[in-house]
Amino acid sequence: MSSQPQESLDLTRDATFPRLLLAHARVRPAHPAYREKFLGIWQTESWADAAKTVRELAGGLASKGFGRGMSLGIIGDNRPRLYQAMMAAHALGGTAVPLYQDAVATEMTYVLQDAEIGFAFAEDQEQVDKLLEIADQIPALRHIFYLDPRGMRGYDDARLCFIDELLETGRSFNQAKPDYFDAQVALGQSSDVSVILYTSGTTGKPKGVCQTHASMIGAGRGACEVDALSPADSVMAYLPMAWVGDFLFSMAQCLASGFTVNCPESRETVSTDMKEIGPTYYFAPPRVYEGLLTSVTIRMEDAGRIKRKMFDYFMSVARQCGSNLLDGKPVSLGQRLLYALGNMFVYGPLRNTLGMSNIRVAYTAGEAIGPDLFRFYRSIGVNLKQLYGQTETCAYVCIQRDGEVKYDSVGKPSPGVEIRIGDNSEVLVRGVSMMDRYYKNVEATNEAFDADGYFRTGDAGVIDSDGDLRIIDRAKDVSTLANGKVFAPKYIENKLKFFSFVKEAVVFGSGRETISAFVNIDLEAVGNWAERRNIAYSGYVDLAGNAAVAELIRGCIEKMNEELSKESMLGHAQISKFLVLHKELDPDDDELTRTRKVRRGFVESKYAPLVSAIYGGLSEQFIETQVRFEDGREGKVSATLKIHEVPTFVVGKA
């Protein structure tokens, strides 16, 4: 299919998502557009089928009164029908507003109110229940369409409509008005807002980022150009639909290139579904790559002695030449032969276990990724690279090119994007992927851009001698210690999270003499470590409070301090005290955003007694914390936390 002519898709003027959809349906009607695993069986939908479904959904929505300028809420896991519902809204001149599917009902209220949602698609009973729970606070909400009828038989609400009924209504509408859909698509302009994506709201209420068809398609086309993405490629869509990255990959890049979007049966089956589909294009945040590597490490610890020795030997070979082979650099014949053997016995089976046998391009973004983790994937033949961007830039600012991958940078500016560094080291961006505005927030929109039209990213960074961008921290978080030296907490936290035993870290030190840290352990990795040492534990709280676990984490921080001491810029920023938190930081408790970014100010305020104890010289502190469970119930968890000291090193003399 990739060899078919592309002229029909060259919509250089007024490109919109519905027009690209219809163009693919003409050029490659039988090519798979979507796959979805349902009840253990993969269902395939061609571009022609997808276009037909979008036409019927649009007809159904139009018959219910949806039209130009309206917003359509989308709540659920990645499903073809939800992507198609967004395109149906686009076809009618509307805007898509995806929400985080794991958010509790009260968290959705603000977005639904702010975006004035009158129509919403909900995946299943769980999401419908959330909408009905807060419906009296959303007076505009008139229609709720659900995809999965299981559990819905006893519901009696005039606002509810099963998607099959909507499709049937759409077919009747289109028969009565056969030219309506095409006429509405023709009215669409590339400057129309295609999606409103709400920021995570780490410091206040979320802001609605308005991205046009032009900005999203421009970002999608540029990314496809860098990696030569084509209809022959396929991607696994499993990240939240409310996250800008999923819209970029599963909508913009999909419609820019014509590749296939695969939707797993559930979030729990992603790894199994990856192995069955074998996508060629993949994205995951660092925590996913870290989790996969942790699972591999645990499995190898359980393997027999011969298997472990073979794994260790060939991984040593991979570290020596794997990345060079991937980048096309010179490698001796002997190493090539050894690597080929390693590929047969270790790397190939390992990639298959990870579901990455066919991966041609893999990306990560959102947080820093450890050099060792980066090297591991690239050494076994996974072309892992970094990209950089924000919701306001369509997640499209920098992309690493093949053969130019560096572990400490996020690459060069993407096609159509310009970057410069402001006076306060803030990264400033302008180009094809810039947002149109913040929804109903003129003041914030004006503050987001400088006089030359550059978007203020809020990140502090530097451009190196190769023209690659290196991110240091959030500009607002970069401060100084009491001695006036630079303090970049995110940079330190990321280095600490490179250890597989550390799931999350929050570092404190602004205006203080020393630096301290809260640590969340990784239950799976630390649990496996404890079981091998016959350390009994009853759960997270018990394991986190174990003295041996504290020594394990102390060793990680000490090693990080030693590595940090060798850096000229932040070598002085070593952690001197830490404690292991008695609970995992959780979005449901407002400690993390739905994209798992730490709400630093909230955490410092919520756990103020612990911060005071650390800097007050105490050796332990009792704390009782209120928690919220997934079903909405609330409870409390308490513990007496030990405060531990860690050795630090003289800068430059470690």
Image (tube, grey):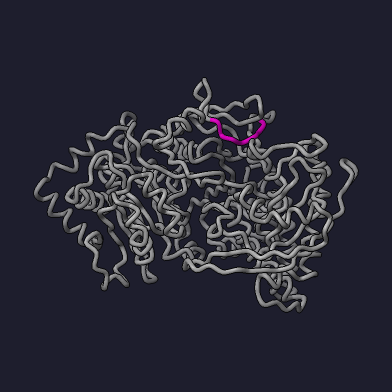
Report x, y in % for residue 33: 34, 52
How many marks do you count on the picture?
0
Residue under the image location 34 percent in, 37 percent down: 6
> Is residue 321 visible to us here?
no
Residue 458 inside the magenta-drawn segment: yes
Report x, y in % for residue 530: 73, 73
Q: Give above or below for 221 relative to 617.
A: above
Report x, y in % for residue 258: 37, 45
> Is residue 633 visible to us here?
yes
The one of 493 and 172 positioned closer to us in this rendering: 493
Report x, y in % for residue 551: 81, 64
Q: State whether the magenta stretch is mostly helix, strand or loop.
A: strand
Residue under the image location 77 percent in, 61 percent down: 553
Residue under the image location 38 percent in, 44 percent down: 114
> Residues in magenta?
456-462
Question: Is 517 on the left or on the right of 352, as rendered?
Answer: right
The one of 212 and 354 positioned closer to us in this rendering: 212
Quadrant of the rendered structure where residue 568 is? top right
Question: Is 182 on the left or on the right of 482, as rendered?
Answer: left
Quadrant of the rendered structure where residue 536 is? bottom right
Q: Give above or below for 333 relative to 402.
A: below
Quadrant of the rendered structure where residue 483 is? top right
Q: Give above or below for 650 relative to 636.
A: above
Residue under the image location 43 percent in, 41 percent down: 208
The one of 594 and 511 positioned closer to us in this rendering: 511
- Name the outermost residue toward the left: 176
Residue 117 inside the magenta-drawn segment: no
- Name the outermost residue toward the top: 452
